[in-house]
Amino acid sequence: MFGIDDGTSLSSSNWRGPTRRRPPFYRRAWFSALVALFLLMVLAVLGGYAIIVTPLWEKAQVYDLNEVKKLEAASIIYDRNGDELSRIFVLNRTPVSIKDIPQHFIDALTAQEDSRFFQHNGVDYIGLIRAVYLNLKAGEVTQGASTITQQLARQTYGLMERSYKRKLMEAFVAQRIEKQYSKSEILELYLNRIFFGKNFYGIQAASLGYFGKDAKDLTLEESATIAGLIKSPNNIEPIKHPERAKKERDYVLDRMVAEKHLKREQAAMAQLKPVVTAPQSTDARLSYAFEAVREEVAALLGEERASVGGFKIYTSIDQELQKKAEQSVKNRLAEIEKRPGYEHQTYEKFRAIFKDWRSQALASKGNATPPPRPKPEYLQGAALVIDNKDGSVLAMVGGRDFVDSQYNRAMDSLRPVGTAFIPFVYAYAFTRPNFFPMSQLADEPLGNDRVMIGGFTGILGEYGMEVSNPKWSRQQISAREALVNSHNSATVRLGEQVALDRGLLRPEFKTFVKNAGIASPLRDAPASCLGASEAKLDELCLAYSCFANGGTRPTRLHLIQRITDADDKTVFQLDEASLQPVRAMDEIAAWQTHTSLDEALHRGTGAVSREYGLGEFPAAGKTGTHHEFKDLWFMGYTSAVTCGVWVGFDKQKTVFPEAFSNKLALPVWTDIINASTKGHTAQDFNPPESAEKVEICRVSGLRATDFCYEKIKSPDGTSKSVRNTYFEYLRPGTSFSASCNLHTGEGLSADIVAFHQGMSQVGETILPADLHRFAHIEPVHIQGPIIIGSDPYNSERPVLRARPVNDDGSPIRRAVPVGPEEGGDPSPAEKPVIKLQPPPRLKIEL
């Protein structure tokens, strides 16, 4: 290009002798090759710019810069009737002005993220080179190459792709933003938009969420802590990872020294302090139900799409029922705390403690580290109400005060279920042909070594009976009676027969429980038969709905039915498949368990519900007390809804001695279930058509006879006999034909006389005086009607059978006993004779 080196050289000589002169460098071959390579690179760059960069630059000009100012709009929550419940932000964000952000936070932010923020035009080329150098020197990524403006562009327009094209696009858009907005505006928009971990969007949400104070009140150390979160918020957030947060905070403080925002002595003093968080809700108007709605929207739409806001969210919440549930949990638990001798922290005591802490925190004014925010240790409660048909959540209470604790105990808390679990042991037993509610179980003391609840020795306690001094009958009782009155020993014996195999739970039983709706794993031990395994309240509500629905349950629970955007376009609609019920158990097992739970509520462990004001409508339910009175449940339902209540402490401990669930959880359940009937009518339960109806004597547990009556005294002092039976529905083919042999008919004459007088106005009825002599004889089932009209004894109806008839349809006459021939009085000694019609004459032809 500049000359060709042909290998020749000019010769010359000096005092040393002949020499050889080299050609100039620009005439050498290597220089020509270098120049050619440079020109090729220039051409490649120009070509790449024309092919790649120019289209990206042109595309960057299309973005609407007004979007930078647009943050999420409020979304409206509607209840099941279409009435507005609340307005919320799906993303936890509260915008603030740049004037409300302390200068030391801005210094910490720029030192960490963009030290030349106030000098560059959106892209810091010097900072880019320096970041690469420092990262290589440190051996890790300590500084990002993107400026604050580039990060704002990325967050606003969703430029999340990891590629050089995205970086170029980000740089072009950042330069446009710098031309459109001032540095102060860019900082304000950036700090109100970016993510700081734990669903905290914006500096105000992070300040309240991590330190319980407004952004304007942040101290130097707190500012450095929050600024240090930006590069990896979830991995550094100080509540879960205080050590990581402190390391990043100290680095930010060092960067502030390097950028001359802080003296070394100040940084050293700040670095000696620990990271102390004081989390607080960012919006006291929220409740557990609204927070659950917000989380479900984010899960359904994705946080990026949800951040747009402006949605109309149609939920299944019953507004009036929700208010009643929240009120009942607060009021009933406050009553418990007023009991004489109650030893734990009360809600009112915590309010006083929190008030003192708040005063100290405000008094510090950032000059000293405030004491840690106190955590609530008072008695907690949770309640959940679901629709039995489709699993929609009608009311949800996750705790007593959402501001004190955002932990949703209704949906997230795993706690031992206690005796609220035992209906599933009986339901599983009832699926077998050889087990039914009249099956007999031994009600006798049981060694705890067979159960291992609270220890390995001694006798298993009967805390499930919900009485102060439980006793064993030491005789056989029916499975129904064992469930109604929650006999622990009898339940374990039943579990050993059907649910356990060599001390471990049978896989079939685990599958049965899972199909019912309890997805949490069961502990593989005998204690699981008495509810030692943990489950969540929403799982139990789903499982108990099986008994209300004849063995089916909703597919899953849901809060949100439909979501529309700002243009009323549907962005989510609950699909029909989610509304279809699933079969969890057969209808006969579900019915037999349901009728037992009906009696458990009205005459068993839940009978005290009448004292709490339980209304007159069909309902059923079961108490649930765990060992040492640490977790207390009541699960129950009507035909329309299922309601579950839990009471206990977040850190498991005894509420107080003999704190039975029918004293703590049942009152809350009674309030809520009464309120539910106003909008969700409780109807009668119908037995399965395939079951066989049998009348059972309550005393013997066998088929009832005409003599199954019990004497009771009326208010006037007179005694009368009352039918003491109930109807059982058995699986077809069940072998159960024994009749009651405990009732002999003694003492019934007065009632029969009264009945006879009412029916025929006859004043005397003769009964054998020695009727008791026939008590050992098994009664014979009647074969024909004995009473015409109303039957007060509800006697067994005979089965009509075919009778022989002649060809013309007339009945074939049978021989009958008759008296003596006409014309004389019968003698007492005479026996009746059989009179037969003479045969027709025979005609013999010869």
Image: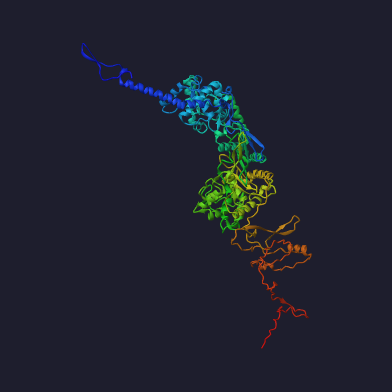
* Res. 651 visible in picture: yes
Q: 790 or 379: nearer the eye? A: 790
Q: 11 or 326: nearer the eye? A: 11
Residue 271 lies, in percent from the top left, at 48, 25
Q: 403 or 578: nearer the eye? A: 578
Residue, far bottom: 846
Residue 142 lies, in percent from the top left, at 45, 27
Residue 423 lies, in percent from the top left, at 59, 51
Colour mapping used in the image: rainbow
Q: 471 or 527: nearer the eye? A: 527
Q: In the picture shown, does residue 778 fall above or below 329?
A: below
Residue, far top: 15
Q: In the picture shown, does residue 159 fall above or below 16?
A: below
Residue 810 lies, in percent from the top left, at 70, 72
**Which quadrant does the N terminus fall into?**
top left
**Number of dots carrying numbers:** 0
* Res. 338 visible in picture: no
**Which quadrant does the C terminus fall into?**
bottom right
Left of 198 or right of it: where is 796? right
